[in-house]
Image (cartoon, rainbow, N blue to C red):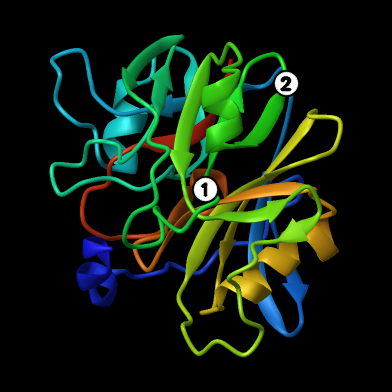
Amino acid sequence: MWARLFAALALVVPRVALAGAPCETVTFEDKPFSVCTVQAGQDLRLWLKDDTGTVLGTFERVKAHLGAGEQLVFAMNAGMYAPDRMPAGLYVENGKELHGIVTREGPGNFGMLPNGVFCMSDAFAVIESRAFAADPPACRYATQSGPMLVINGALHPRFLPESDSSYIRNGVGVSADGQTAWFVISDRAVNFHQFARFFRDRLGAPNALYLDGSISRLTVPAQGRADFGLPMGPIVGLVAHD
């Protein structure tokens, strides 16, 4: 995607290990991955614009947008977007659809079908986009991205084990019962095949969705992590309350 042009600007700030930290580092095949785990019922949200219609775009602006007594536990970029930072596909916020679903094949990673939708309601789901369009569930929040990483326990058919296309990548996987969502960013460059295998073989996610690569970043305030880069489109994050 166009955002790869900005990859050289990304700077990862090392994490500080804290007891009870919201995110942990998990090593898989000699590569470190940061994993932030969310349980159904926790306050997980998507953000795009503020009350004036201005795209938030940064973790700091998301934090400033929170209400009294709310703290950002972690956040990361939440799906692909156009140069104006509008979502590339389906985007639902607080039950309101702000951008429609896209089911056609197209260029780039987003159009590498099957792609999918991450849906948040009383439980979590990652659903292939055409299946979602045929029978759309009610989502409090939803973001479409692509490609799917894991589809009903199988890796995306176009992923190659020996591919030399390696980037920092982030994505989300969901447990079989829909009660757990894992938000993951690779802390070293990986190809699609290894990234997908991490979700399936290490986390046990039967379905997982790629969110983006090269622009991927994460903030975990309590751990001192704040990845830098140009402003983003949709952002996903967990909120704690006093």
Question: Where in the figure is residue 78, as x and y percent of width and height?
Answer: 44, 42
Residue at point 26% right, 60% down?
Answer: 229
**Picture quadrant of residue 184:** bottom right
Residue at point 42% right, 38% down?
Answer: 103
Badge 1 marks a residue whose secondary structure is loop
Circle on res. 123: 2
Note whether 20 is above or below 106 in the view shown. above
Q: Is residue 44 visible?
A: no
Residue toward you, 130 or 181: 130
Circle on res. 31: none
Residue toward you, 42 or 123: 123
Residue at point 50% right, 69% down?
Answer: 14
Report whether 41 appears left or right of 47. right
Task: Indicate which disc, 2 or 1, sits on the residue closer to the N terminus.
Answer: 1
Compute the Cα span from label 2 to label 1.
Answer: 20 Å
Residue receiving disc 1: 115
Circle 2: residue type:
Ala
Question: Where in the figure is residue 226, as x and y percent of width and height?
Answer: 41, 55
Residue toward you, 224 or 198: 198
Which quadrant of the figure contains the C terminus? top right
Note whether 163 is above or below 72 in the view shown. below
Mark 2 nearby-residue class (10 Å; few <14, some 14–19, many ≥20): some
Note whether 93 is above or below 219 in the view shown. above
Report whether 123 appears left or right of 113. right
Q: How many marks?
A: 2
Residue at point 66% right, 84% down?
Answer: 161
Badge 2 marks a residue whose secondary structure is loop
Circle 1: residue type:
Asn
Note whether 47 is above or below 87 in the view shown. above
